[in-house]
Amino acid sequence: MWTGAAFLTAMLVGAPIGICLCLAAILFLYLDGNTLLYASMPTQLFDSAGNYGLIAIPLFILIGDIMNAGGITGRIVQMALAFIGTLRGGLAYVNLVANMFVASIMGSASSQVAVMSRVMVPEMERQGYRRDFAAGLTVYSGILGPIIPPSIMFVVYSVLAQISVGNMLLSGLIPGLMLAGSFLGLIAILGLFYPYPVNERQPWPVRLKAIIDGLPTLLIPLVIVGSIMGGFANPTEAAAVGVVAALLIGWLWIGDLKLSAMPRLLMRAAGYSAIILFLVAAAGVFSWVLTYGRVPQQVAAWIQTVAQDPITFMLLVNLILLFIGTVIDGAPALIMTVPILLPIATEVYGIDPFHFGVVVVINLVLGFMTPPVGLCLYVASAVTGVKPSRLFVVTLPFFLATAAILVILSIFPFFSTVLSR
């Protein structure tokens, strides 16, 4: 109890989550009277951050930064507009499809929402869409970022769970497409009640030029996902090749990326990566202390009194994680919950770790879009000027669609595990 109180107090006063985890671990050992284990904590910190798969994180972040600086996002939007922009409500579909392509490169919900809000919302408003709808659609399109590979959260989960990073990334592909499909269907249904504007039909030469200009950008997700699925490279190697592809496309093909900007992009990626890697290291210490204190076993004993079968357990986990995700950011929430819940899922209920990872990550990403914290709501609000409360009201149908997909994924593991076997 005192350990939990110390953790919450440190978090409420604004201490970084990694520091909170380390303080909680130190206090736990002190109250237990086993202070001799303090000498092992630096080793645990170092070992937790020494996993080879973690190298993929700064590379994925760098890909996203290069893509933004190199004008790749704009080419993807124009290509999507050339394909489906002439449909009724076409720009809404373009927003989602473009976000799906960007998600296959960026792997970060908040970064994706920030970029696409600047690109899509003003254009949708100019074409006659309500600003709050355009911003809300962009927010929920951002949920695809941490689901469709590459995904920083899947990499972190894989390290925590000690499973294959490549297979975990592949596990998110079908669920990500299911989410995208449900959003496309929802846009069509909403179009029956709201008068979506119709875009002007572009001449074929203009559409063809947009497609030709945008096609090279698809090399980035093809290199990353294709090399992993084909067994030619592991996720870290694929991410490295993806960086080179993004650099060459932004610099030589599009021409918007200047090599003089690379030091700034590298420093930005390094800073964000350091935050995540310290979280992972602190989580290793926290998990080590929890195992020593037999906390997972105690939680498992309580859960078994409530959940008698795997499906009930998964639905209970959905409720718990959705609540946690609304008040704690995704990566820290992942790091705090996986060491406790994963052993229960795999050892007590026999749930596949890849299946469990997909459900956990989608739950926590959904928290990005949900008050009171709702990181992506606040990012979109800062960019577009729409109040976060209004964004949540507008996006409620997308919230319900995501929740429905989560229930399906919780009950049927096939969708999450078919590509990882």
Image (cartoon, grey):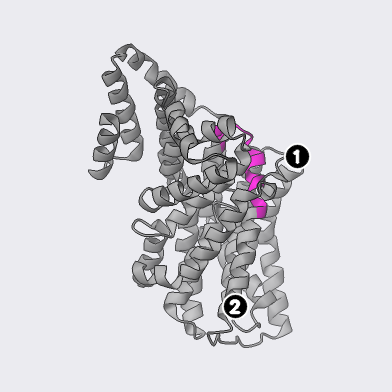
Q: Which residues are magenta?
A: 158-174
* Residue bearing the label numbered 2: 189
Residue drawn at x 44%, y 73% as measured from the top left: 394
> For the residue marked with disc 1, what is the amino acid?
Gly
Is residue 51 found inside the magenta-colored segment of the image?
A: no
What type of secondary structure mainly makes up the magenta span?
A: helix
Quarter occupied by the N terminus = top left
**Image position, residue 116 (x, y; %):** 50, 66
* Residue bearing the label numbered 1: 231
Identify the element where label 1 is drawn: loop
Which quadrant of the structure image shows residue 337?
A: top left
Q: CA distance from mark 2 to mark 1?
A: 40 Å
Identify the element where label 2 is drawn: helix
**Image position, residue 35 (x, y; %):** 30, 14
Quarter occupied by the C terminus = top right
How many numbered discs sit on the rendered protein?
2
Residue 255, placed above or below residue 175: below
**Image position, residue 124 (x, y; %):** 51, 79
One can see residue 71 in this view = no
- Left or right: 376 with respect to 100? left
Looking at the image, the residue that sits furthest to the top is: 36
Residue 406, placed above or below residue 300: below
> For the residue marked with disc 2, what is the amino acid?
Ile
| Label 2 neighbour load within 10 Å: few <14, some 14-19, many 20+ | few
